[in-house]
Image (tube, rainbow, N blue to C red):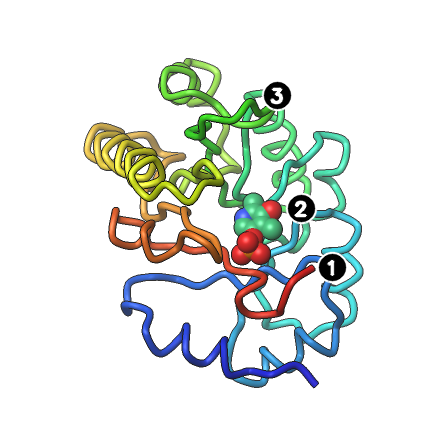
């Protein structure tokens, strides 16, 4: 059985305002149930199919967060139950989420993924693109989504300064938008940044949601 020591010690040291998403991708239903038995209710997955099959099998009071890249044609599978989509990176995707949310008669919470790392990546919006999207006329028409904040991933490096810089910039941008935006479909409450290797830094920089996988479940 999965050793829960690491999970319990992370939980114990976490400030109360920080929400822990236990990233269970590739991990078994048994391992998830072990962490569930410790009280954890929020789990993160990065693949649609895997999240759907785990949703079917596992207790219904689990909140499922999709943390990975999402393709528009797969939104329909998660729309009935997903509780937060972390990695929205285009208006087209947002439109599809809105459409599927409407079909399911619900509002789906989303975070915009901001590209903050040095590495080349296909995913995420830059700061300017986030503002363009949020302040566009078309965006204001989407009534079945709610943007609850931003998500970002720092450069994968041991150089603390680089990571700190990236997280700090994102946190400042988040605070700026939070103060400025007054749209019906935006309610900024959540800054999702920090994973196993860098969540301590992320919290120090203002994160209030961390996505931790390997430190809880072991390496993948
Ligand atoms: C896998 C993953 C995580 C968790 O990574 P760990 O290093 O195992 O904590 C966090 N966020 C995203 C987007 C991921 O894909």
Residue named by callout 2:
79
Q: Looking at the picture, tell me which residue is in the foreground, 90 or 104.
A: 90
Q: Which quarter of the figure is the N terminus placed in?
A: bottom right
User: In the rendered image, which quarter is residue 159 located in?
Assistant: top left
- Which mark is first along the chain, 2 or 1? 1
Q: CA distance from mark 1 to mark 3?
A: 28 Å
Whether the residues at callouts 3 and 2 have beta carbons within 8 Å, the answer is no
Residue 84 shows in the view: no
Q: Residue at x 61, y 69 (%)?
A: 217
Q: Nearer the viewer, residue 57 or 108?
A: 57
How much space separates mark 3 and mark 2, taking CA atoms? Answer: 16 Å
Q: Residue at position x 45%, y 30% from top?
A: 117
Distance CA(mark 1)–CA(mark 2): 21 Å
Residue density around tag 1, few if under 14, some if 14–19, many if 20 or more, within 10 Å:
few
Which quarter of the rendered picture does the C terminus lie within? bottom right
Q: Which residue is mark 1?
A: 26
Place of residue 105 in the rendered image (x, y in percent of width and height, measured from the top left): 61, 46
Q: Residue at the location (51% across, 26% down)?
A: 119
Q: Is residue 187 visible in this depiction of the protein?
A: yes
Measured along the vertical axis of the image, is residue 6 above or below residue 124? below
Whole-percent x and y of residue 215? 53, 66
Task: Identify the element where label 2 is drawn.
Answer: loop
Task: Mark 2: give few (<14), some (14-19) or many (20+) Cα within 10 Å.
Answer: many
Q: Up-down: is 16 above or below 80?
A: below
Task: Return the residue at label 3.
Answer: 92
Labelled disc at residue 12: none
Query: Residue 91 falls in which quadrant of the image?
Result: top right
């Amino acid at each position: 059985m999965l050793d829960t020591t690491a999970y319990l010690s992370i939980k114990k040291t976490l400030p109360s305002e920080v929400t822990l998403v236990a990233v269970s991708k590739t991990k078994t239903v048994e391992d998830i149930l072990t962490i569930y038995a410790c009280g954890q209710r929020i789990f993160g997955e990065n693949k649609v199919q895997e999240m759907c099959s785990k949703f079917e099998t596992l207790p219904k009071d689990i909140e499922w967060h999709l943390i990975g890249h999402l393709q528009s044609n797969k939104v329909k599978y998660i729309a009935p139950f997903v509780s937060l989509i972390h990695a929205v990176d285009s208006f087209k995707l947002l439109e599809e989420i809105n459409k599927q949310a409407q079909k399911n008669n619900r509002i789906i919470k989303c975070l915009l993924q901001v590209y903050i790392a040095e590495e080349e990546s296909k995913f995420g919006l830059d700061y300017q693109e986030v503002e363009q999207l949020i302040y566009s006329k078309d965006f204001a028409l989407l009534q079945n989504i709610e943007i609850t904040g931003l998500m970002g991933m720092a450069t994968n490096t041991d150089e603390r300064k680089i990571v700190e810089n990236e997280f700090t910039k994102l946190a400042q941008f988040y605070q700026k938008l939070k103060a400025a935006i007054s749209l019906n479909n935006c309610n900024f409450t959540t800054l999702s940044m920090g994973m196993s290797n860098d969540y301590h830094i992320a919290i120090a920089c203002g994160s209030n949601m961390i996505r931790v996988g390997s430190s809880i479940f072991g390496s993948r």
